[in-house]
Image (spheres, helix red, strand yellow):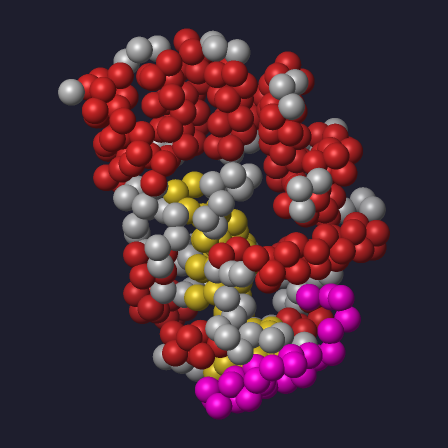
Amino acid sequence: MKLSLVMMVRDEASVLPAFFRNHLHLADEIIVVDTGSLDDTPAIAADAGARVLSCPWADDFSSPRNQGLRAATGDWALVLDADEEIATGDFDRLRSFLGSAPPGVFIQPTINYCDDAGHLEWQPVSGQYPVQERGHRGYFAARRAGLFPVTAELRFRGRIHESVLPAALDAGLPVTEIDLPVHHYGYVRSTEINRKRQERYLDLARRKLGDDPEDWGARLELATAYLENGDPVSAEPLLIDLSGGPAGLRPVVRGCFLLGRIRRERGELDSAEKVLQMAIDQDPTFVFCWLELIRCRAARGMWASVDELLGRARKSCGSEHALLAKESLRCMIHTGRLREGAQQARQLVELYPAWAEMRTLAERLTARES
């Protein structure tokens, strides 16, 4: 099966050489759609053997992506950006998978490396991909429909946070999750690059919601953009709207989580717990809702309730999560179980060796234990 790697780029000369070194032996062809670079991006891509196309930027991520798909000649398309990569250790698994995969759209986990532990859904890296982790402390997870057949039916939609999923649903194609992660470094680039990205995303999210005011996903995207720009006041009305949306809809659940977090951080614990419980009732597998509810109870000093919620969260989410373990450790400390806490902290350091905060805590607890 022939694989087309399809990219859109602009001013990525600093990262493209490494990108091509990593991926040249993965794809049968690489198609690069340039949206107006002022640096050597097009020349670097051409020298690497990519087919380079030009698409003037028009405040719409879908248009250049679709130009790249129309040019693809492979059986399958893999969509990546210049600050992303597939681990070389996963190449054989990916090619083997495509050799027998039925037609359909495949959802890949995205590991967004992030060194800011205050990010909304931050968690520590585990060491599973040491080369890709590159010394970064943590990440937040996302999902993307980035692997699918090359067919005229599948085109991106949306000005920002564009996706082929609506087209796949219209075409009746199955959508399946696969464990072939994309490693994304957009959040660990320079402060200036991140500032410009946040400003651009906020502007486009406003426009996307203006294009369709009934788009629940666009409402969540705009609220998230406000939060990432440090503006919870503008985000809150959008999240309140989401909390009254259709039950079970993913943006509604995430909107309740974000609204609950805002209110918990403001000390409005009753209101926060109400909206968080609403989200858990709709999707008991979303661990970050449990974490916020646990933090509400911890803020009240209700440690027996924290213990009970931790047990329910583990059962609902299917496995231990690093941040659930951290909340469990906090509960042990506040209830005087220091020896048990020291042991758990040491275990967490073994599991997450780059978790500097946990290493410091383990050292302090061990010192007190001795």
> Closest to the observer: 100 or 138?
138
Residue 160 horizontal side relative to residue 212, left or right? left
Say above or below: 84 vs 203: below
Q: Residue at x 60, y 82 (%)?
A: 39
**Can the viewer see residue 316?**
yes
Find residue 51 and report its horizontal and vertical position in percent.
55, 87
Tell whether position 57 is magenta: yes
> Closest to the observer: 189 or 279?
189
Residue 283 horizontal side relative to residue 22, left or right? right
Say above or below: 155 vs 270: below
Which quadrant: the N terminus? Answer: bottom left
Find residue 324 and report its horizontal and vertical position in percent.
40, 29
> Closest to the observer: 220 or 229?
229
- Region rendered in magenta: 36-61
Q: Residue at x 51, y 61 (%)?
A: 189
In the image as oriented, which residue stretches furthest toward the left?
A: 370
**Can the viewer see residue 186?**
no
Say above or below: 267 vs 168: above
Tell whether position 167 is magenta: no
Find residue 49 and report its horizontal and vertical position in percent.
47, 89
Q: Residue at x 55, y 88 (%)?
A: 43
Residue 344 horizontal side relative to residue 259, left or right? left
Find residue 147 and report its horizontal and vertical position in percent.
50, 64
